[in-house]
């Protein structure tokens, strides 16, 4: 059963769960200064305890605190959201993480989703454009874009991605991948478009992550559905399974290690 809490009580709980090192990392990643440094898992647990609460979600969002806004995305009721509220939540944002949370958790399922999608995709502001493409991707995945002219959408993706700002490129590419994954009749075409667009993302792929290059992303996701692994995935797992080379330590370091271990034993 949902647990009733006031805004003040929720904010105190979030603050008490903050970690300074994590806070500093969030700040470096663009979360702003109004941030506690709370793990996402703890925010999810609090959201599960609170249950859907649209009014509290709007209050949490208004605080401007990063974790409060992440939590708000988990409490807001998509069906209760007006277009004016949605625009007021997203359009002032400068943090793509919050944009994606709003889109994935709230806007995609809202009755106003298609109107927001068209308004933002046709606009010029960077993060709203990203949101418009991600809303379309989410609606495709949920089977909610039944009247979509997929051919026209793919042509627009190929036309707009090359010159789009980086954050918009990410949203457009996400939509291309989701078309390839959720509309089997267009999988081959989505892969072909991805190949023509090329590797537009210059960043190295972090260990354990899937490439943002659409043909590889689509292939990896389809293989996973079948319980298979791509060659890239096999190579990555093989590299992770190799034992790390033993590090040589000086005699002084060994002595220090033994001393510390002995000290811990004395305290038990």
Image: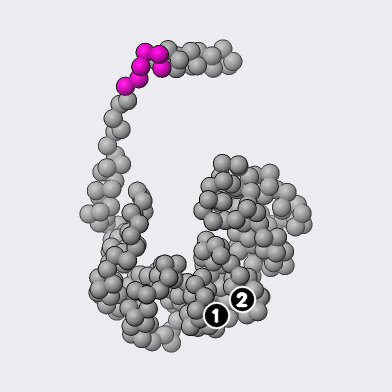
Q: Is residue 251 magenta?
A: yes
Q: Residue at x 55, y 62 (%)?
A: 95
The quarter holding residue 199 reads bottom left
Q: Mark 2 falls on what kind of element?
A: helix
Q: Is residue 96 visible?
A: yes
The quarter holding residue 200 reads bottom left
Q: Quadrant of the C terminus?
A: top right
Q: Mark 1 falls on what kind of element?
A: helix
Residue 22 place in picture, x, y as percent = 56, 45
Q: How is the image coloured?
A: one colour
Q: Residue 66's mark?
A: none
Residue labelled with disc 2: 87
Q: In the image shown, does 91 or 81 lie closer to the viewer? A: 91
Residue 177 place in picture, x, y as percent = 35, 70
Residue 65 place in picture, x, y as percent = 66, 57
**CA gap, disc 1 and disc 2:** 8 Å
Q: Is residue 186 magenta?
A: no
Look at the image and give the residue range highlighted in magenta. 248-253
Residue labelled with disc 1: 116
Q: In the image shown, does 144 or 164 lie closer to the viewer? A: 164
The answer to whether the residue labelled 1 contacts the one labelled 2, judged by CB atoms less than 8 Å apart, is yes
């Amino acid at each position: 059963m949902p647990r009733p809490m006031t805004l003040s009580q929720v904010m105190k709980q979030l603050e008490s769960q903050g970690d300074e090192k994590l806070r500093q990392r969030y700040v470096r990643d663009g979360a702003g200064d109004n941030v506690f440094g709370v793990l996402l898992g703890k925010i999810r647990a609090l959201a599960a305890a609170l249950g859907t609460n649209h009014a509290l979600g709007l209050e949490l969002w208004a605080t401007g605190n990063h974790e409060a806004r992440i939590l708000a995305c988990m409490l807001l009721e998509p069906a209760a959201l007006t277009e004016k509220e949605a625009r007021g939540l997203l359009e002032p944002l400068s943090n793509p993480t919050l944009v994606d949370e709003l889109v994935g958790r709230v806007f995609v399922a809202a009755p106003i989703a298609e109107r927001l999608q068209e308004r933002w995709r046709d606009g010029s502001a960077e993060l709203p454009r990203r949101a418009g493409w991600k809303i379309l991707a989410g609606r495709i995945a949920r089977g909610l874009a039944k009247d979509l002219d997929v051919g026209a959408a793919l042509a627009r993706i190929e036309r707009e991605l090359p010159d789009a700002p980086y954050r918009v490129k990410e949203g457009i590419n996400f939509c291309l991948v989701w078309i390839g994954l959720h509309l089997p009749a267009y999988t081959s075409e989505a892969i072909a478009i991805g190949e023509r667009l090329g590797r537009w993302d210059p960043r190295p792929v972090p260990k354990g992550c899937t490439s943002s290059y659409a043909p590889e992303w689509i292939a990896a996701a389809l293989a996973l559905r079948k319980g298979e692994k791509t060659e890239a995935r096999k190579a990555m797992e093989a590299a992770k399974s190799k034992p790390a080379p033993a590090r040589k330590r000086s005699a002084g370091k060994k002595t220090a290690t033994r001393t510390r271990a002995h000290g811990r034993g004395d305290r038990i």
